[in-house]
Image: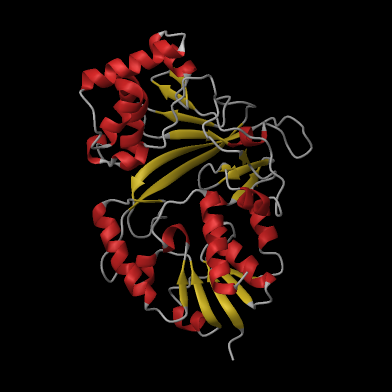
């Protein structure tokens, strides 16, 4: 008889939610992860009293009331609002693109003036039906903003010319004829006080965990432990890349502690010129308003420079490249996965799909209910 009902491979958000739901229904659950810690890419660690987002900034935002209620069972969220800044050769602009951006770029002071400027540049570019990311961006914000604030950043992030990228990547670009400086259009937003690791630990409370172990290296032994497997790793890696490797963008981080209280005055600054090698700098303390757990000002700061890179085996995959070629390959792997006995595939890597955090949780709850019952 198997020791566990479910082996959950991956202690990120998807795996943690599924494990919690299975445990709550009386199932015997083992969670494993190849990393030496839980929480996957939302892992936060304390450095100089600052919760540092080791794998890049994660700001929780959602319009899903059920998901918001769910995460608040495991954490207290602060009131952080995402208001990033764009740095183009030392010129600073507001992100999202709003009236502050338009005033800085063109000197306009009314929404009508800004709208006319964008419309004139769209017309001059001759764009009616955008066919790629470049055309989509120009149709939304005009040529000037595209050239300064979109083109360089996007090409660094994706490693491809904007004309070769699909339009849908930038359809969520927030453009507002108001002074609203909140990047997200969501009813709920914030960051767990003290970081995400504590939240995930609360989800996994009472669930057995083994960290720093590689499922695929010891697959036969692990499979023998449980009746079923919830696999949240890369689907192509599960099948040993039998049909070829799916493509991702990866990210490299350079993090350092600075002996000063304030480096850039904002949690996120995007570097939108092509000459700067990094895409953005995160200053982690501003996710917590520069305060420690007791509300005291912190004397030091921690910054992370992010460098986008083409993924290769051995790197951490971050962003699926959901173009036609990769989506076709994924569908072939998905068909193979459907034939795997007693194995469920889920999450960003298991489903080869970019998910926001709230979408991961909603999907994990959906899969949990289908598998475990209400």
What percent of the width, then of the height, locates residue 108? 42, 9
Horizontal side of residue 175 vs 28, given as left or right: left
Farthest left residue?
A: 126
* Residue occupying image coordinates x 53% and y 41%: 57
Q: Considering depth in this image, is 369 or 184 the residue closer to the camera?
A: 369
What percent of the width, then of the height, locates residue 29? 62, 75
Horizontal side of residue 58 vs 164, given as left or right: right
Give the answer, above or below, for where 65 lies relative to 348. above
Q: How is the image coloured?
A: secondary structure
Give the answer, above or below, for where 47 lies relative to 332. above
Q: How many marks?
A: 0
Q: Considering depth in this image, is 215 or 355 the residue closer to the camera?
A: 355
Horizontal side of residue 1 vs 324, given as left or right: right
- Viewer can see residue 220: yes
Q: Where, by quadrant of the figure, is residue 1 drawn? A: bottom right
Q: Considering depth in this image, is 176 or 280 the residue closer to the camera?
A: 176
* Residue occupying image coordinates x 58% and y 24%: 265
* Residue occupying image coordinates x 57% and y 67%: 368
Give the answer, above or below, for where 312 lies relative to 276. below
Farthest bottom residue?
A: 1
Give the answer, above or below, for where 135 lies relative to 107. below
* Residue occupying image coordinates x 61% and y 26%: 262
Query: Which quadrant: the C terminus?
Result: bottom right
- Viewer can see residue 12: no
What percent of the width, then of the height, locates residue 316? 42, 55
Q: Where, by quadrant of the figure, is residue 314 drawn? A: bottom left
Q: Considering depth in this image, is 169 or 262 the residue closer to the camera?
A: 169
What percent of the width, then of the height, locates residue 47? 64, 43
């Amino acid at each position: 008889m198997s020791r566990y009902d479910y082996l959950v491979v991956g202690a990120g958000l998807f795996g943690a939610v599924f494990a919690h739901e299975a445990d709550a229904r009386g199932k015997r659950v083992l969670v494993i992860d190849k990393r030496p810690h839980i929480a996957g890419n939302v892992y936060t660690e304390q450095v100089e009293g600052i919760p540092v987002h080791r794998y890049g900034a994660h700001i929780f935002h959602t319009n899903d009331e059920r998901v918001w209620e769910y995460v608040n069972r495991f954490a207290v969220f602060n009131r952080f609002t995402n208001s990033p800044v764009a740095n183009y050769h030392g010129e600073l602009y507001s992100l999202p693109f709003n009236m502050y951006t338009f005033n800085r770029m063109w000197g306009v002071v009314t929404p009508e003036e800004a709208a006319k400027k964008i419309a004139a540049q769209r017309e001059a570019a001759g764009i009616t039906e955008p066919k790629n990311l470049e055309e989509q961006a120009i149709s939304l914000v005009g040529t000037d903003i595209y050239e300064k604030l979109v083109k360089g950043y996007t090409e660094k992030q994706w490693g491809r010319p904007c004309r070769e990228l699909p339009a849908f990547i930038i359809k969520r670009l927030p453009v507002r004829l108001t002074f609203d400086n909140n990047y997200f259009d969501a009813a709920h937003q914030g960051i767990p006080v003290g970081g995400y690791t504590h939240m995930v630990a609360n989800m996994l409370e009472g669930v057995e965990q083994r960290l720093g172990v590689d499922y695929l290296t010891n697959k036969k032994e692990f499979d023998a432990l449980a009746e079923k497997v919830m696999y949240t790793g890369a689907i192509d890696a599960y099948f040993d890349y039998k049909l070829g490797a799916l493509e991702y963008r990866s990210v490299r981080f350079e993090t350092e502690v600075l002996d000063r209280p304030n480096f850039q005055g904002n949690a996120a600054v995007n570097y939108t010129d092509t000459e700067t090698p990094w895409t953005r700098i995160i200053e982690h303390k501003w996710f917590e308003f520069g305060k420690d757990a007791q509300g005291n000002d912190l004397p030091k700061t921690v910054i992370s420079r992010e460098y986008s890179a083409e993924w290769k085996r051995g790197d951490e995959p971050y962003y699926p490249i959901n173009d036609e070629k990769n989506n076709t390959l994924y569908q072939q792997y998905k068909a193979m996965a459907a034939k795997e006995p007693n194995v469920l595939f889920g999450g960003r890597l298991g489903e080869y799909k970019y998910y926001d955090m709230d979408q991961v949780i909603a999907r994990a709850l959906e899969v949990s209910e289908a598998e475990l019952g209400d």
